[in-house]
Amino acid sequence: MPRLTWHHDSVAWLFLVLSLTINGMQPPEQTPRQRIIELITGTRLSSYQLAQMLGIPERQVEGHLTHVVKTIARDKTRRFILNPARCQDCDFVFRDRSRLTSPSRCPQCRSEAIAAPRYGIDLFAPQLE
């Protein structure tokens, strides 16, 4: 087994420090749902990416997302965006899927190579009537 050089050790240390800093940058008084809303506003992230950023299991993120959708639905200045999962082999897009979790396999080609759905929040000004 190759021994890690100083460079590899320093890169690993830097990654650890940065990940702790990113996770620690959020005020502790924010709930996980508030942090998810903040993270996905203006961008698109998968549940795996959110789990890594928040330091919680992916399944917990998916559970919180259902409540985030309800919260955002009440706000007229924000809109929840779901970029659906897609099969990487045949390009089938899971448009009609109601669940926010990633499907296990493609209904067309039975492949398990599924690109995860991405979630985001877009801000927009309400229409004046």
Image (tube, rainbow, N blue to C red):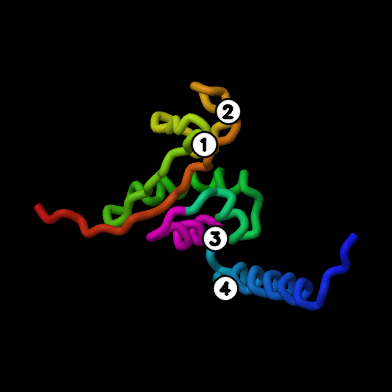
20 horizontally vs 96: left or right? right
Q: Residues within 10 Å of mark 4 (few under 14, many from 20)?
A: few
User: Residue 31: which numbered mark, if any?
Assistant: 3
Q: Tell me which numbered mark, 1 or 3, is placed earlier along the sequence.
A: 3
111 drawn magenta: no
72 horizontally vs 59: left or right? left
Instruction: Give the amino acid at mark 3.
Output: Thr
Q: CA distance from mark 2 to mark 1?
A: 8 Å
Instruction: Give the amino acid at mark 2.
Output: Ser
Q: CA distance from mark 3 to mark 4?
A: 13 Å
Q: Which element carries disc 4, helix, strand or loop?
A: loop
37 drawn magenta: yes
Q: Nearer the viewer, mark 1 or mark 3?
A: 1
Query: Quarter-wise, where is residue 25 in the image?
Result: bottom right
Residue at the spot of label 2 = 111
- As drawn, the residue found furthest toward the left would be 129
96 or 56: nearer the eye? 96
Instruction: Give the amino acid at mark 4.
Output: Met
Residue at the spot of label 1 = 88
59 or 75: nearer the eye? 59
Q: Tell me which numbered mark, 2 or 1, is placed earlier along the sequence.
A: 1
Q: Where does residue 125 sit, x and y in percent of width and height?
A: 22, 59
Q: Nearer the viewer, mark 2 or mark 4?
A: 2
Residue at the spot of label 4 = 25
Q: Residue at x 50, y 47 (%)?
A: 65
Q: Where does residue 117 sit, x and y in percent of width and height?
A: 48, 42
Q: Which element carries disc 1, helix, strand or loop?
A: loop
What type of secondary structure mainly makes up the magenta span?
helix
